[in-house]
């Protein structure tokens, strides 16, 4: 009887230790994925900024794209929040004000980064502008 109780206690100890170890491993993997995804975030934001500025978006209010960064993949979608024009400028005769077209746009960007089996979503605002021709 004593051996059975000792065996039961040993089995419970081994089971508990295994569950704790498994939980720690899963938490470690999840933390690693989060760190990697957060590390890729500034590079993905820079890529998206370049893509948004290169696109001809004069009349568009919705932009989207995707790409790869080393071992990760990202998808993004941007919705125009606001379009503003610069202040009027003086014309050649110094008496007339020339209205300029809306060149500054504020976008709400939704970014999804994927790495390994994990995925993380980010949301931020981006300002773009059109060069003066």
Image: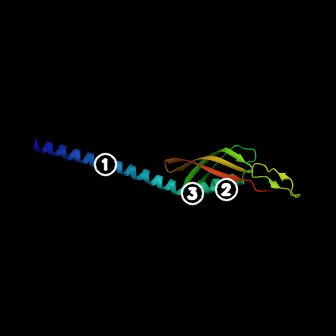
Q: Residues within 10 Å of mark 3 (few under 14, many from 20)?
A: few
Q: Which mark is residue 50?
A: 2
Q: Nearer the viewer, mark 1 or mark 2?
A: 2
Q: Earlier in the sequence, mark 3 or mark 1?
A: 1
At mark 2, the secondary structure is helix
* Residues at circles 1 and 2 in contact by the CB criterion of under 8 Å: no
Residue annotated with mark 3: 42
Which residue of the protein is positioned furthest toward the left in this rendering?
1
Above or below, 109 against 39 in this view is above
List x then y, in percent, for residue 91.
85, 56
At mark 3, the secondary structure is helix
Residue annotated with mark 1: 20
The one of 9 and 120 positioned closer to us in this rendering:
120
Position of 44 with respect to 100 (left or right) is left
Q: Residue at x 32, y 50 (%)?
A: 21
The one of 107 and 98 positioned closer to us in this rendering:
98
Give the quadrant of the N terminus: top left
List x then y, in percent, for residue 79.
65, 43
At mark 1, the secondary structure is helix
List x then y, in percent, for residue 10.
20, 47
Q: Residues within 10 Å of mark 2 (few under 14, many from 20)?
A: few
Position of 129 with respect to 26 (left or right) is right
Q: Residue at x 80, y 55 (%)?
A: 89
Give the quadrant of the C terminus: bottom right
């Amino acid at each position: 009887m004593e051996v059975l109780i000792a065996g039961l206690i040993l089995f419970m100890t081994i089971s508990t230790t295994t569950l704790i170890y498994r939980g720690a491993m899963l938490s470690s993997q999840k933390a690693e994925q989060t760190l990697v995804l957060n590390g890729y975030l500034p590079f993905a934001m820079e890529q998206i900024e370049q893509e948004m500025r290169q696109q001809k978006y004069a009349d568009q209010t919705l932009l989207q794209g995707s790409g790869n960064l080393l071992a990760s993949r990202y998808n993004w979608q941007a919705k125009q929040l606001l379009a503003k024009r610069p202040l009027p400028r003086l014309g050649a005769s110094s008496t007339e004000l020339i209205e300029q077209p809306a060149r500054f746009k504020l976008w709400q960007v939704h970014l999804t980064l994927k790495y390994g089996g994990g995925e993380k979503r980010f949301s931020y605002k981006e300002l773009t502008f059109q060069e003066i021709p």
